[in-house]
Image (spheres, rainbow, N blue to C red):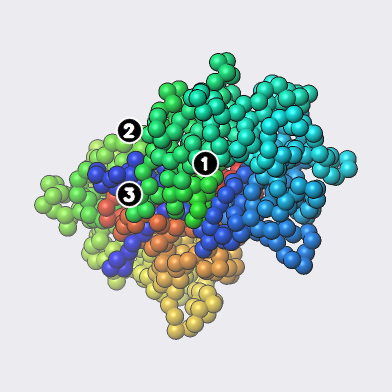
Amino acid sequence: MTKNTLVLFLLFLFPYLFQSANSKNTSPYFFTQIGVEDGLTQGTVTNIYQDTDGYLWLGTQGGLHRYDGYEFKVFKNNPTDSCSLTDNNVLDIGEDKNKNIWVITDNGVHKITHQTGKIKRYYVKETRFMHCCMLSQSGDFFLAGEKFIYQYNEQGDSLVFKDWLSSTPIASNIKGLQEDEEGNLYIASSSTGLAVLNKQREVIRFYQHEPENPSSLIKGAIRRLFTDSRKRLWILSETAGICYLDKENERFVHLNTDNSALSSNVVRAIAETDSNTLLLGTFSGLNRVDMQTLKVTPYKFNPDEPGTLSYYSIHSLLKDNTGALWVGTWKGLNYYSPVRTQFYRITPREFTGLLGMGKEDSDGNIWFATEGAGLFCYNPNTQSQQFYPKKSPYKNNYNSNIFKSLLIKGDSIICATNLGSVYLFSRKRKDYRLLYDYQYGDIYTLLNDSKDRLWIPTNSKTGLVLIDKGEQINQFKVDGKSRKFFFVTAIKEIEPDVFIMGTLSQGLHKYDMKKETLKTISSAELNLPENVKPGTVSTILTDSLQNIWVSFFGYGIFRFDRDLNLIKHYTVEDGVTDGYIYSMVSDRNQSLWALSENDLYCYNAEKDCFAPIRNESHRALEFTLHAGTTDTKGTLYFPGNKGILCFTHPGWRKTLISLPYI
């Protein structure tokens, strides 16, 4: 029932779960890479900014990008359009109090109006030499360039020059603006020093580098300013490392390659990842700074490790409003999310063979059918494992301990074998009792319907069997005549006495027992050529909108209405890049998930498409058809030959950026 090699590579697995013990990757982050192939117009991501609506704005040397978690909207220069960017090399991005986005490029200053999305260019004498911008605590929006500060005048929709620096030695290249809790404004020049202005914008202090004083301002090439949660002002340099201003002692505390483990003195980016940790982006990778001890820990860049950065040279960093970390490098964008990486693997302590269908009991245990060890019980809270073979010792009786499907009903677990037999396992007594024996074939699924009847789709000559009050029925009325159903792999009751049945290769049926009607969906009705079989039906689900979802192991995912009329076939254009779907599950939030050979997909109802979670970790698992399940806590379980891959996804759709419609 499976391909010889059914390999699923999943994207967000924690690297330390799958790496060997001698792995040299000391980074705690497992990154996903986003590059030109994903929509970036150019790979060097120099700026990352998140606006108050949650959108990410990315500055590159090839234009501005707005990212909504699914796709990029690109803003570039158009020589024939005065409402486009003047050029494509983005230097800084900011936001004013009215949610307008400001973009500084090599040759211009631009405002993207929040309500309309239209771009307006602003012209002043020094426009070509603007470098940075900032929103103050009072709502003033400042922009700075060579030696000049401008303030946006909302009433006149113009930039107004502020002559605040004429008394200072600042000569050129203002690269940083920052405001402290008292409203003092710090203005850093790349080469000449740091000016401090009070709330009245009077210069009250000017710091310069003093060659004979190791506690003076950092020497040259200042890149930017940053204030941490402890109110310390950090100054980043592209030649001398990093320092912070110790206001109480009027001195600067330095970190560089001479006095710490900092991997490079070229420090371009900084972010605070938690209350005790700063992350630095350098020419030679990421470095962690302990804010209490100032100990620096460089993270080794190894391009051959799964989950590594796309490049070692880092230009920008951002921790977004969900806690995800974004890293802009010379060759692409990278992100790590503590939410999106909730993958882990359950590895049975004993041999089980291929792990199959799973179900949750009333106590929160997850039970799995195995092909060699009987039933396998896992408790997610205690992580305990229990094995219940049908015949002991199971290590010498693997063939007698194969189960293909199971159904939990109160204290009992009904489980079916590969030889057509059905057993009842008592959770209380921990013993098995034979219920039915059809003597041949896999039983892929079991159903207890709304009338407490048991459906057993055998693959024997008996066909589909209905157990109704002890009576075994395998003849079903259709238009007044009796018939059997064979090779059923999935069955779903959509209303009392109305069933959707999927088969190995005989297609899809809707059977109404009361009306004695049968509707069979042909290949043509699936928009497939008549001579093409859609494949084995792996799952049938219904959603809150009364849609019927059917997955095939061969031709992907289909959505039908209640009368089994095709609504849509989801293909590559809809995010389903692989038609071999092993199983679909609906989680506690009614989110729909589908598993294919190469991807895990989540359905986006707003856009009516699937978002694939692609593999880049190269960790192979062979998965089991029909076997995916979910528990009441929202964890997804995908059994296979080497264990069970689990995915916990609180707020998965909002892990990229917190937007109202994601």
Dot placed on the residue nearer the N-terminal end, 2 or 3: 2
Crowdedness of circle 2 by 10 Å Cα count: few (<14), some, many (20+)?
Answer: few
Label 3 residue SS: strand
User: 158 or 405, which is in the foreground?
Assistant: 158
Q: Which amino acid does label 3 sit on?
A: Ile
User: 184 or 397, which is in the foreground?
Assistant: 184
User: 304 or 46, which is in the foreground?
Assistant: 46
Task: List x then y, in percent, for residue 260.
Answer: 39, 31
Quadrant of the rendering where the N terminus is positioned: bottom left
Query: Above or below — where is 247 with respect to 124?
Result: above
What residue is disc 3 on? 644
Q: Nearer the viewer, mark 1 or mark 3?
A: 1
What residue is disc 2 on? 382
Task: List x then y, in percent, for residue 394.
Answer: 15, 49
Dot placed on the residue nearer the N-terminal end, 1 or 2: 1
Query: Above or below — where is 350 with respect to 443?
Result: above
Task: List x then y, in percent, for residue 456.
Answer: 35, 60
Q: Could you give the CA–CA distance between mark 1 and mark 3, rounded to whole angstroms?
A: 47 Å
In screen coordinates, is 47 left or right of 305? right
Dot placed on the residue nearer the N-terminal end, 1 or 3: 1
The answer to whether one can see residue 405 in this image is: no
